[in-house]
Amino acid sequence: MSNKNFRSGVLYGAELTELYNHASKHDYALPAVNVIGTNSINAVMETARDLESPVIIQLSNGGASFYAGKGLDNSQQKASIYGAVAGATHVHLLAKQYDVPVVLHTDHCAKNLLPWVDGLLDIGEKYYAEKGQPLFSSHMLDLSEEELEENIGTSKAYFERMNKIDMSIEIELGVTGGEEDGVDNTEIDSARLYTQPEEVAYAYEELMKVSPRFTVAAAFGNVHGVYKPGNVELRPIILKNSQDFVKEKFNLDKDQPIHFVFHGGSGSDLKDIREAITYGAIKMNIDTDQQWAFWDGLRAYEAKNRGYLQAQIGNPDGDDIPNKKYYDPRKWLRAAEDAFRVRLTQAFEDLNAVGKNKI
């Protein structure tokens, strides 16, 4: 008999819904970590294993392209498609070895990037036919810059396709500010940073016609990146108002019928994070802080060992002593991973997510 709430490996379908319901019931959210290569993927799984918790691993369009290699042409989304497939294959192979439940996700896909998800679904359908499970747990369509009806109509059409292979979908309502992965919303009208309950209700009504397996990234002032205190005004109460509105409009028994997603988690105040969780946020995206942590680990390694990193031979201990053990990439990449894991541990703690895979 297993002493864990969720099996190791990539979760999907009903078990993914069960995980999100568990998070909602027990007042925690899962960190959703953007990754760009094996170092960041492995560091995420190592952290989740040590903290005995499920985790969400996600690839953005640019991150997937980078995973494939900057030398691979990305016309027609080739590098982004096959980079994402390569990253997903890596996770499928090693998640069970790390003994970690993983939600495998793709991040923001705007209208101009839909061929990326088209390609992933083409491959995912073949994968499902062969393996009996999807390649990814879920995809995110971010059509928030389009009119609401187009956003939900297009998302619904894709959701119908995903649902046939036991996948979930994440949609965005309202716009996440700031800049990330080539999408610049720094000059966006601030009113669009706050989603209205009526918009959430419309999305809920339409997506429920396909399946209840969806999450909603509703904007409540979220911004990508990190800014000085006071520059970002988060209003998590928007999530509560939306939950209440949907419950009343559709005469539901469940107090929190929506699984919400918290975008732009880096740099957020702990009180805002915890408040959002009480209103049904079960997933928080974190990227910018993790990028800084990875770099800071590398920076600290170089500063500590600078005298041993200036030449292949010769260091403070002697002119003829070799330095290979210091400039070996396995040394400094591991230092970066260690710093990455420390910051991710903080995210798990902030989200009340430590130890959530223990019965």
Image (cartoon, rainbow, N blue to C red):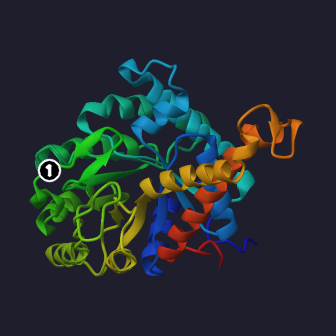
For image coordinates 42% across by 64% down, the residue present is 283
Give the x, y percent position of residue 99: 71, 59
- What residue lies at 53% left-to-right and 61% top-to-bottom? 15
Count of numbered labels shown in the rendering: 1
Q: Is residue 172 visible?
A: yes
Q: Position of residue 286 (x, y in %)?
A: 44, 58
Q: Is residue 189 above or below residue 349?
A: above
Point out the image quarter for the C terminus: bottom right
Label 1: how many residues lie within 10 Å, few (<14), some (14-19) or many (20+)?
few
Q: Is residue 84 above or below residue 359?
A: above
Residue 355 pos. (x, y %): 62, 75
> Between 298 and 102, which is closer to the camera in this rendering?
298
In the picture, measured across the screen, residue 314 lies left or right of residue 350, that is: right
Residue 9 seen in render: no
Quadrant hosting residue 232? bottom left
Give the secondary structure at mark 1.
Answer: loop
What amino acid does circle 1 point to?
A: Ile
266 vs 14, left or right, is: left
Front residue of this view, candidates 124 and 321: 321
Q: Residue, x 18% and y 46% (percent of image)?
A: 151
Q: In the depicted view, which residue is nearer to us: 130 or 263?
A: 263
Q: Position of residue 5 (x, y in %)?
A: 62, 71
Residue 318 occupies which quadrant of the picture? top right
The vertical placement of 141 against 219, above or below, is above
Query: In which quadrant of the rendered image does the N terminus lie?
Result: bottom right
Disc 1: which residue? 188
